Image: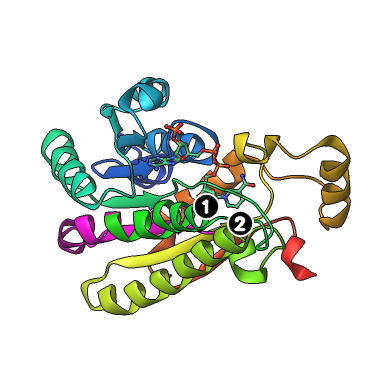
Amino acid sequence: MTTPPADNSQAQAASAPHVGKVALVTGASRGIGRAIASALAAGGAKVACVATSADNAAQTAAACAELTDGARAYGVDVAATSDVAELVAQVREELGGLDILVNNAGITRDQLLLRMGEEDFDRVLAVNLKGTWNFCKAACRPLMKARGRIVNITSVVGLTGNAGQANYAASKAGVVGLTKSLAKEFAGRALCVNAVAPGFIETDMTAAIDEQAAAELKASIPLKRMGTPEEIAATVDFLVGPAGAYITGQVLVVDGGLSLG
Ligand SMILES: NC(=O)c1ccc[n+]([C@@H]2O[C@H](COP(=O)([O-])OP(=O)(O)OC[C@H]3O[C@@H](n4cnc5c(N)ncnc54)[C@H](OP(=O)(O)O)[C@@H]3O)[C@@H](O)[C@H]2O)c1
């Protein structure tokens, strides 16, 4: 009697959940975006790695290309609406579609309101909120067709507020409202839209915090440490994979308990 060949299809699907998908990740040159691009590539997705310039995103794209059969670097200012539309069309043409959009690019320009200039408010809103809207707008038709996924990176600060970050917190609260509204608009087309709200994560963005402030910060986090980019990437990976198919309009907080207060 011969033993039938083992059915490895379930194991393969679990280890490579994004095979056949094309993902676009903004802010992919560094930090959280780089970790997200790598996680999606490790799951088999072709990945468009977007930063302010293709040169900046090139290292991430090269690392992704080691993991999957398609990865490219692209450059755009996410705040520039027509450039974003052109970029999305280019990615679809070059990578063969679009199934997963991760809006991760973001900036801070921290200052107490008394000292905050109008330009600091406008630019943070333009990159963090308008940039997210730009990509959702440009990509929603192909994403609906693909019954795809959108994940927007917000911040716990968008939920709790933070002194010195009125511009940043407003932009991230806006991303929450945008996410929930789009989840309602696209649910009928099985396009799930969610947000991930990191707490304090070890990246260039938080590297400027001085040693004493960082120590105080860690002490205030119930898990007593900052998070890693990979921990945020794992959450995004879950939301855009098969396990996230029945989750939409949610904000998943990944902050070591910081926002528990
Ligand atoms: N780190 C944290 O503790 C933390 C906490 C909560 C939320 N977040 C959010 O997580 C996201 C990633 O943060 P991070 O800490 O990884 O940041 P980061 O290390 O400072 O990297 C920022 C990324 O955004 C890109 N970017 C900035 N402005 C852009 C623009 N106008 N157009 C296109 N790309 C632009 C940068 O590209 P270039 O390299 O080309 O400049 C870079 O890839 C952000 O949305 C941030 O607000 C971070």
Q: Position of residue 36 (x, y in %)?
A: 47, 41
- State which quadrant residue 54 falls in: top left
Say whether marks 1 and 2 touch (CB < 8 Å).
yes
Q: Position of residue 230 (x, y in %)?
A: 58, 39
Q: Is residue 180 magenta?
A: no
- Quick check: is the Cβ at mark 1 less than 8 Å away from ligand 1? no
Which numbered marker is on residue 120? 1
Instruction: Give the side of residue 124 with respect to residue 115, left or right.
Output: left
For residue 181, above or below residue 13: below
Pick the quarter of the image with the C terminus.
bottom right
Which numbered marker is on residue 7? none
Q: Position of residue 130 (x, y in %)?
A: 36, 59
Pick the quarter of the image with the N terminus.
top left
Crowd rating for badge 2 (residues with CA inside 10 Å; few <14, some 14–19, many 20+): some
Q: Amino acid at mark 1?
A: Asp
- Secondary structure, mark 2, is loop
Q: CA distance from mark 1 to mark 2?
A: 7 Å
Task: Name the residue carrying label 2.
Answer: 116
Residue furthest toward the left? 93
Q: Find the magenta span and give its range.
A: 135-154
- Quick check: is the Cβ at mark 2 less than 8 Å away from ligand 1? no
- Secondary structure, mark 1, is helix
Residue at the spot 67% in from the left edge and 38% down from the top edge: 202
For residue 170, above or below residue 256: below
Instruction: Mark yes or no: residue 118 visible.
Output: yes
Residue at the spot 61% in from the left edge and 70% down from the top edge: 159
Residue at the spot 27% in from the left edge and 58% down from the top edge: 148
Q: Position of residue 78 (x, y in %)?
A: 33, 46
